[in-house]
Amino acid sequence: MTVKDILKALDATVSSGSEHLDQEITSAFASDMMSEVLAYSKGQSVLVTGLCNPQVIRTAEMLDITCIVLIRGKEANEEMIRLAEERNLVILETKYIMFSACGILYGLGLEGGTT
Amino acid sequence: MSEQTGTSGVELKYMVSPDDFTRAGEASSKVKNILKQMGISPDVIRKVSIAMYEGEINMVIHAHGGDITVTITPEEIRMVLRDDGPGIPDVEKAMKAGYSTAPEQVRALGFGAGMGLPNMQNYTDEMKVETEIGVGTTITMSVHIEG
Ligand SMILES: Nc1ncnc2c1ncn2[C@@H]1O[C@H](COP(=O)(O)OP(=O)(O)OP(=O)(O)O)[C@@H](O)[C@H]1O
Ligand SMILES: [Mg+2]
């Protein structure tokens, strides 16, 4: 599936990287703690998070995550959008809570993993 | 920041600013880009990026910033992270997964799970922590380049 499919399924809006919506996605990671993402992610390409600060973009950058999904109606600030645009990262924003967003993406066939 | 190329490899130096959490990770980001341009393998880049970023964040949230020196040779990528913060009273304890003294406001920023130091250890081939209470902490890490 592509980022576009995620965008539709989560009824989301795009706040960065609208020109990168056709990239293929196979797996996702979800957490509000960036330390956990850094410790346990294994090459997933989507990060689902309720944390909303520039370190979300930096964490994604370090791990080669290409798409960030902000949940619970969080909105990326200017600094986040600037950093994301510079790095060709997509930011999607959805009103779904963590449980729902993850359930929907899992149902679409995105893989997760274990520690 | 400064960059130097000599017979002993490429040396990169960065200052890590203490008072702007937004900018924490800037040095790691720059190093990641330089390693990419140099054609270093993605696996090595991933290890260096994660370890250095965790260390850089620690310098901002637990100390008052400092400086980072990265040396790139054909054999290894060596990172030296130096701060003049409070020091670490019990390094063995600090290295344990889940141990953190981070206050609530740091957790609200997405850090403070006590995973940084263990993560740095896991992603590097060598790691040394030198620390003195009231003087500061220097962490030296190396990722080997398989050849
Ligand atoms: N540069 C430093 N100066 C002083 N204390 C430090 C430094 N780095 C780490 N520590 C101490 O070691 C503890 C463990 O560090 P570690 O990076 O593993 O976890 P954390 O930073 O608290 O949380 P996380 O890294 O998961 O966000 C810290 O809570 C802090 O008490
Ligand atoms: Mg840490």
Image (cartoon, rainbow, N blue to C red):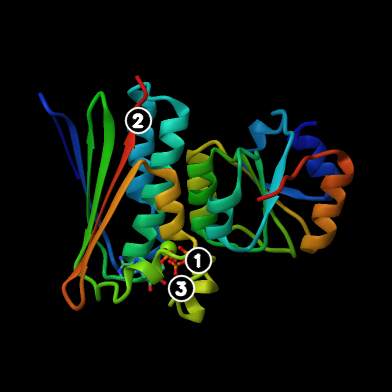
Q: Which mark is residue B100?
A: 3
The 10 Å Cα crowd at callout 2, few under 14, some 14 to 19, many 20 or more, is: some
Q: Amino acid at mark 2?
A: Leu
Quote the CA–CA distance across marks 1 and 2: 26 Å
Q: Nearer the viewer, mark 2 or mark 3?
A: 3
- The answer to whether A54 appears left or right of B126 in the picture is right
The 10 Å Cα crowd at callout 3, few under 14, some 14 to 19, many 20 or more, is: some
- Which image quadrant: the N terminus of chain B? top left
State the residue at coordinates (46%, 80%). Answer: B103
Cβ of mark 1 under 8 A from ligand 1: yes
Q: Specify the subunit that label 2 lies on.
A: B
Residue at the disc numbered 1:
B111
Q: Specify the subunit that label 1 lies on.
A: B
Residue B126 location, x and y as percent? 31, 44
- The answer to whether A68 appears left or right of A6 in the picture is left
Of pointers 3 and 1, the one earlier in the residue sequence: 3
Residue at the disc numbered 2:
B35
Q: Amino acid at mark 3?
A: Ser
State the residue at coordinates (36%, 67%). Answer: B92
In the picture, residue A7 is in which quadrant? top right
Quote the CA–CA distance across marks 2 and 3: 31 Å
Q: Give whichever of B88, A52 is nearer the camera.
A: B88
Does residue B71 sit above or below A10 in this rendering? above
State the residue at coordinates (16%, 73%). Answer: B135
Does residue B43 sit above or below A84 in this rendering? above
- Classify the position of ligand 1 by quadrant: top left, top right, bottom left or bottom right: bottom left
Answer whether residue A43 is visible to the viewer in this image.
Answer: yes
